Amino acid sequence: MELPGTSLSVFCLFILSAYLFFFINVLPLESASLLGNETDRIALLTFKDGISRDPLGALTSWNHTLHFCQWEGVTCGRRHQRVTVLDLSGNKLGGSISPAISNLTFLKEINLQENNLKGQIPQEIGRLFRLRYLNLSNNFFEGEIVANLTSCTHLQLIDLEYNKLTGKIPVELSTLSKLLRLNLGANDLTGTIPPSLGNLSSLINFYLVQNHLKGSIPDEIARIESLKSFQVSVNELSGTVPPSLYNHSSIVIIAVAENQLYGSIPPDIGLSLPNLIGLLLAANQFTGRFPMSISNASRLEKLELAQNYFHGPVSENLGSLKNLVKLSLWVGSLNNLGELDISWNKLSGEIPSTLANCKSLIRLILEGNSFQGTIHPFLNTSTAIEVLDLSSNNFSGNIPKYLEGFQFLQYINLSFNSLEGEVPKQGIFRNASAISVIGNHNLCGGMPEMKLPACPALANEKRRKSFVSRVIIPIISSVLCLVCLLCVIAALCWTRKSRRKPSSTSSKEGQYLQVSYLDLFKATDGFSLANLIGVGSYGSVYKGILGRDENVVAVKVLNLQLRRASKSFLDECEALRNIRHRNLIKILTSCSSIDFEGNDFKALVFEFMPNGSLEKWLPPKVDGNHQLRSLNFSKRLNITIDIASAVEYLHHHCDIPITHCDIKPSNILLDEDMNAHLGDFGLARFLPRIIGNSEDRSSKIRLKGTIGYIAPEYGTGGNVSMAGDVYSYGILLLEIFTGKSPTGDTFKDGLSLRKFVELAFPEQVMGIIDPLLLLEDEEVSATNNDRDKKRRLQECLVSLVRIGIVCSTESPRERLEMVDVAKEMNEIRERYLGVGIHKERQNRGLILGEGSSYLGNY
């Protein structure tokens, strides 16, 4: 029997229980989640406050209009909407890391590599107990490594490479049992390698290259079973390499070059390490026989054994290592080998003739060994060689005559051998400063600067010439006198012609001048700052006085310490080698050699442009006489036409179309007549090589260019194209006639030079034109009362701005082609000069708008 009201009581009790459960359990969790979200947002904004520079606008989305999970570089978890990843790599951010980053307690990944951050790494990072990935490489952090990172027990990667960190490696790092990669390279760390790091049982990559570490390599490190890469090159380590490291079953890279290590290499290293990819032992004190078994390491890509004390024969089977890309000793049939340096070892015998297969060999350095025999004829096929050093060996016989024909040879050293006979006189042997033959006591002849004794055959030749001069010549002279009397008229004509000034040249027509490092060193007064005329992305440009003719030149010296500088040199040489146009900078020669300290040296020599770059004229400058130095309308128009003509040539009239990829004022040089020449082809690309290869992603991702001038599609990985150059030209055009730089302080918060001009077009165009041009306009009207010329000037300015807008439109398909741009620019000049005023076209096409859907609204 059911009691009255019992069902109601039970129901009420159930409702009450549900409310109590919600308030006690659910509501606190929800409140905690909301509180955590606010904590993350505040922490991110505090992090942003520590950033002083954001040139690429990476943090512009960090505002109150978006949820912080939608901010650039921020990733949140799905469950609690808490920050799990902070990735702002490659944004050139300046400033420091705020300690408030520790409040992002759900963080698993921090990636701030390739920025300009400085200061110390906050100790508070050690509180992020969920952290698995920490990458702060390629910045300017200083101070010691954070020791309390050991609290981040889940860490799998620590990458602090390329900073300014000091102090010792914290022994506490040995407790990070899940660590897979430890990268502390390229810092200023001191002390020893802690043996306790051998406790990192999961470690795969151990990278401490380029520090100041001393002491020995601990045996404990070699006991890490998972270890695959051990790299400690460029330190001050001493002692021997642990034998167990050579016999490690998993290791594929051993890099200990440029230390003070000694000992020998196990003779079975190629058998015990068949999966070896890199063995870098150069610049140490290793001894013993060359490890013949190394040829069994079929996956080997890098082998560096130079500058040690190895002896004995080298395996003839090295040529079977098909994956080898760098070899520092001598070699077999390596077709793509560019440099071979096996200097200062104890290698003997003759140079193997298999080197004849190395068609790409540029530098051959065999200095300081015991090679013998003649200079082998196989070198006759190595015509690409630029540096040849066979000094301090036991070579004998004559210096081969075929070396005279090596047009790329910049330096040759044959000193301290047993060579004999006559020294050649042609080719590189004409430049005494580029060769060395001292220490060969049986050599003779050569250029007078060598101060070698005359060859016996040459002495007999002198005696024969003496007899001819004393007996034969007087008889012949008498006969010739009679002939000369009959040729007086012809002689007078010839004398008249001979009075004309002959043109002087330093090289044969169609051939590049050959110069050495010493030539350029003298020409620039030791590359002095007084002769420095410019600094670019990959090097510096100096003014120089070159050769006996004292030609004024510009010498661009590549900074080979910069990544991609060597590639930039090769790209620029390739682009300039076969192009000829009056508005392209003229290359006189190139130099790929070594400096006085034995370092690689690469330079390009150009025709000197006395009026410098266009960048120095925009905006107007005051010269040394306190006179305003500016460009009038005519000069600006001519410069833009010159560049349009140059780019049209590159795009449409070369055998292989070329894109310049870096059109900007600093790359436009002005000669003494203010004619413009486009220069700096370090980023130039041959279109078929890129467009025809869909796998070549580097052409998209690694393309640099210059902020403000680079086409927007390049920033998102778009293909290199002619349209990219057209965009840069359009921005250049707008800059020249408005006098405003696209990277100026005026343009921020989403406003660009193009948008600034577009907002004023067409009615308010004269309001954005460079005031100096308008001042010139007023002077024309005041002095000449030439209203028609004033009207033409204003019409031309409107047309020029219109071209600039169309060329720099965001969509590549809507931009003009340079062949049309060049044609329209020339027509604008004709209209301004009053040439063909009545020759109006029925259809103005892309300039006056009727043929363009984009300009139809104007």
Image (spheres, grey):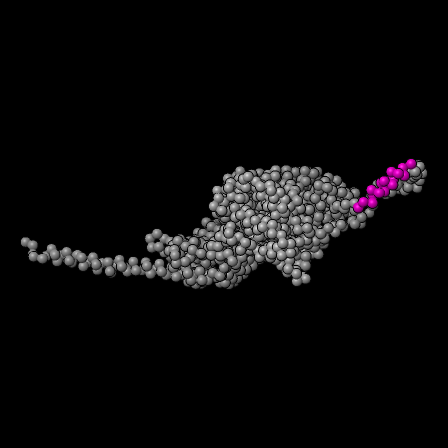
Query: Residue, x 71% and y 48% (percent of image)?
Result: 515
Residue 478 visible in rendering: yes
Q: Report the magenta stretch's main SS.
A: helix
In the visual, does 194 lie left or right of 317?
A: left
**Rendered location of residue 351, percent (x, y):** 67, 41
* Front-lying residue, 463 or 708: 708
Q: Give the camera-side residue of 757 and 69.
A: 757
Residue at x 67% of width, y 61% of height: 624
Q: Which residues are magenta?
A: 486-501
As drawn, which residue projects farthest toward the left? 1
- Report if residue 238 is visible in the image: no
Q: Going by the image, does 524 lie left or right of 149?
A: right
Pinpoint residue 8: horizontal percent, then vertical percent.
Answer: 12, 56
**Which of 490/331 is in front?**
490
- Residue 15 vertical placement versus 645 (above, below): below
Instruction: Give me the residue at 66% from left, 59% from top.
Output: 529
